[in-house]
Image: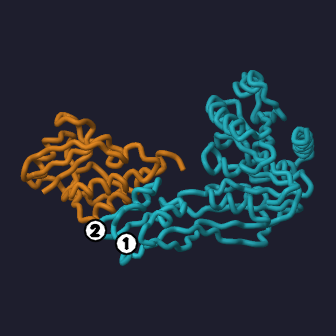
Chain colours: A cyan, B orange
Amino acid sequence: MGVNKLKIAILSGKGGTGKTLVSVNLAAVCNDSTYIDCDVEEPNGHIFFKPVIEDKSDIKVLIPVCDDAKCTGCRACVEFCNFNALAHVNGSLMIFEDICHSCGGCKLVCPENAITEKEKTIGKIEIGKSNETNVISGIMNTGEESGVPIIDELLNRDFIDTYNYFIDCPPGSSCTVMESIKDADYCILVTEPTVMGLHDFKMVYELVSLFKKPHSVILNKCTIEYNPAKQFCLDENINILMEIPYDSELALLNSQGKIVARESRKFNEMFSILLETVLKEVHK
Amino acid sequence: MIVAMPVEGKTMSASINKSFGRTQYFLVYNTETQQKTFLANEAANAQGGAGIQASQFIVDQHTNALLIPMIGKNAADVLKGAGVELYMTSGCSISGNITAFLDGKLESLTQIHAGFHNHGGK
């Protein structure tokens, strides 16, 4: 993705707090925008956008192949592999493709040049359009170890040329999330008023702070009850963009796979205001 | 012959460990010399692929038979590839299982589970 673009990443730590709700609806109310689903293990943005797919491409990684005739059984590769994807038994090298992270280290450390690499498809990317919004989804094949190569491709290849990008991150705070926010200009943390939501929110808050990313919070599913996440934001002086109410109409539309900003004037206004607030924050 | 098993401690009174890849120790027993050696399992804290690393270690001890309550697919592939025979433990006593094995009372382990992967994250 080139320069002079605005990349906004939406993350939460805990799943089900409203990452996709926020990213889908922000992308839907924003002009000149692309929604990118980086939750490659279980992408669901397409359920809402129902995009017309215009292009697809397979994502491949390189995994080692050993030439037994050249291998002397020195095990330099077995000892090097941090993921334990290799074992040397009975005079030959066993390669566990599902565990390999495609780092290429085994090939580099082999003193006999016995290791070459072959391509393996781990997933695909689908590029489509839903009304005026561009939709790009990364889909990892079941059983694959890491979605990082797919996310890397999603964010670094210029599939679509728009100004605004909304990056729907995977849950958690591991490598896939780091890859998703790495080049983001701004991070939106979505949280909910639960103890678990707050716990995981603290993890992603720590992550975006570590990455020195400017960030704000959206408090989702707010009721009149005590909100531990809000209290944390107030205590830590974290900017709150919006409090989305716990609203049965919104929940119903969302559960039917509808984009609330496209279905109702009320929610369209809500997300338009949110977008305006976000853009003001970004350009501060 | 060499018989190995995952154990919870470095004494004969310790129990058989339910986990193979993440066990703290292995007992390696030489049936001819009756020598018993407790070895720390370096794979116990591996980020991933603990079963594979532990299997490599067991193979490297020239193990002929491994006594375990259960085992994952990747580990079993390495062990079988090296010709290590797998037997299912009965109860958690170390000496009880050695005796049962020597008496031919332990059954071959045929049920291989898919593995409990991603303990250490991705």
Q: Chain of mark 1?
A: A
Can you give x and y, in whole percent of width and height, for residue A228 in the image? Answer: 69, 25
Q: Is residue A57 above or below residue A152?
A: below
Q: Which residue is mark 1?
A: A71
Name the image quarter holding residue B61: bottom left
Of the numbered discs in the image, which one, if any, rests on residue A120? none
Q: Residue at x 69, y 37 (%)?
A: A210
Can you give x and y, in whole percent of width and height, for residue A209 in the image? Answer: 71, 36
Give the foreground label among 2 and 1: 1
Can the viewer see residue B74?
A: yes
Can you give x and y, in whole percent of width and height, for residue A103 in the image? Answer: 54, 60
Q: Which residue is mark 2?
A: A90
Of the image marks 2 and 1, the number of the one nearer the N terminus: 1
Amino acid on which the number 2 mark rests in the picture:
Asn
Lateral position of residue A132 relative to residue A193, left or right:
right
Q: Residue at x 63, y 51 (%)?
A: A176
